[in-house]
Amino acid sequence: MPKDVRPSATGANRCSGVPDSRGQQNRDAVPFRVDSLRRGVENHLMKTIPNRLARRHLISLQGLGAPDRSAPHPALIDRITALGFVQVDSINIVERAHHQILHARQRSYRPPMLSRLVERDRTLFENWTHDASVIPTTFFPYWRHRFARQKLRLRERWKSHFGHDGFDDDLARIRDHVTEHGPVLTRDFEGDKPSTGWWDWHPSKAALEFLWRTGEFAITRRVGFQKVYDLAERVIPRQHFDAEVSHDAFVDWACRQALARLGFATRGEIAGFWGLLTPPEVEEWLSRNNGDLETVLVEGQDGANRHAFALPGVADTALSDHPVPSGVRILSPFDPLLRDRKRGERLFGFSYRIEVFVPEAKRQFGYYVFPVLRGDRLIGRIDMKADRATGTLNVRAFWPERGVRRSRILQAGLERAIETSRRLAGVDTVAYETGWLRETP
């Protein structure tokens, strides 16, 4: 078991001032803390991960590093488990986000491969992290803690949003229907009266989503992109459905597994990774495991160092460097490398905002532009869209980041990456808009 080492109280070892030359206390002197001085010494002794190595370590952790040619080809479920989860999104500009995320890491990936893991093998289940995601089914026992919290939070929030008193009756009605008749789609209840809630959800849709997000229902398959709901006990394999973990084991798992995938992280980044923990839970865990963790300094793109926590040995691993492919890769806007926008900007100097909900006249780039990775740097963003009616991938624009020099080599790399996207989208040709190579904004 990890040692329960707690830091000393913040207010300990404090001096109110320093004596002046006459032996009197100089009340104009700036107070200082001995623990602040100690932190200065610790900072000097602390390992610093330079920005370039931090980027390369993170790229490797996120499954985008150079493949180990001597190792067996990882199975898709192992890749997803290493990532922790893959965000699911309905927008299909080139290909849906979850497919693009996996294809960026495994060129042989095709969408039916993911469907098999969810619908046949049951090694993945769909639920929520920070957003809708596919998650390894071995993690289901830990999600029970999320379900319990969501049940309390959503009950009050959704009842007030949908503004009707029959919410519990709707839950009972839908639960009974699925228990007796089996899997359902939302459209099976389209005769329900509309509500005044989100997206004009009708009461049955709200009930289905509530029962799914709180763990009573699970997604057994999708038809097109529509969810098919069933009782979770009929979807989740029994060994995972019946398993339970204590609160302390849940918190310990969530913190350690977040750190394993982030490499190094602040308190807030640990709490935000899975969307499972509260900041006080992370704070208590860090205090309890202080002696078993490394504190490192991580250099940002701007040269500033920031404290972060890491599991033992991570600093040495990061400092050993990691080879990354030198070619150009086009990423999903929801790629795990950039899911945390603030972290991405701090480490890569890349400020990304998805403009789906921004009025067209106010967009800086486009409705749905894709980040572009080259080696260990994010070098720009590209606006492209698959027109399946004509079998064409239309490339509207590429905007390089400041400091990225346009060259024939860069253009050739971009065109190879665009060709890879064309194959994923399943269209026949690429059409480039005149002047698609833009200037840095």
Image (tube, rainbow, N blue to C red):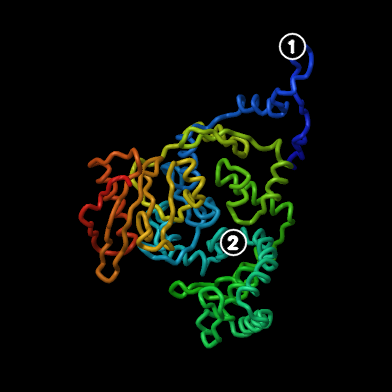
Residue 21 is labelled as 1
State the residue lying farthest toward the left.
434
Left or right, 344 with reference to 171: left
Query: Eyeballing the image, is 249 above or below 131?
Result: above
Q: Whole-percent x and y of residue 257?
A: 61, 48
Q: Amino acid at mark 1?
A: Ser
Which residue is pictured at 49% across the width and 37% down the height? 300
Q: Is residue 211 visible?
A: no
Residue 137 is labelled as 2
User: For numbered disc 2, what is the local secondary structure?
Assistant: helix
Image-quadrant location for residue 193: bottom right
Q: CA distance from mark 2 to mark 1?
A: 69 Å
User: For numbered disc 1, what is the local secondary structure?
Assistant: loop
**Nearest to N terminus: mark 2 or mark 1:** 1
Q: Amino acid at mark 2?
A: Thr
Query: Eyeballing the image, is 100 above or below 167?
Result: above
Q: Whole-percent x and y of residue 431?
A: 23, 59
Q: Quadrant of the N terminus?
A: top right
Which residue is pictured at 66% across the width and 37% down the height? 293
Left or right, 336 with reference to 267: left
Query: Eyeballing the image, is 424 above or below 32?
Result: below
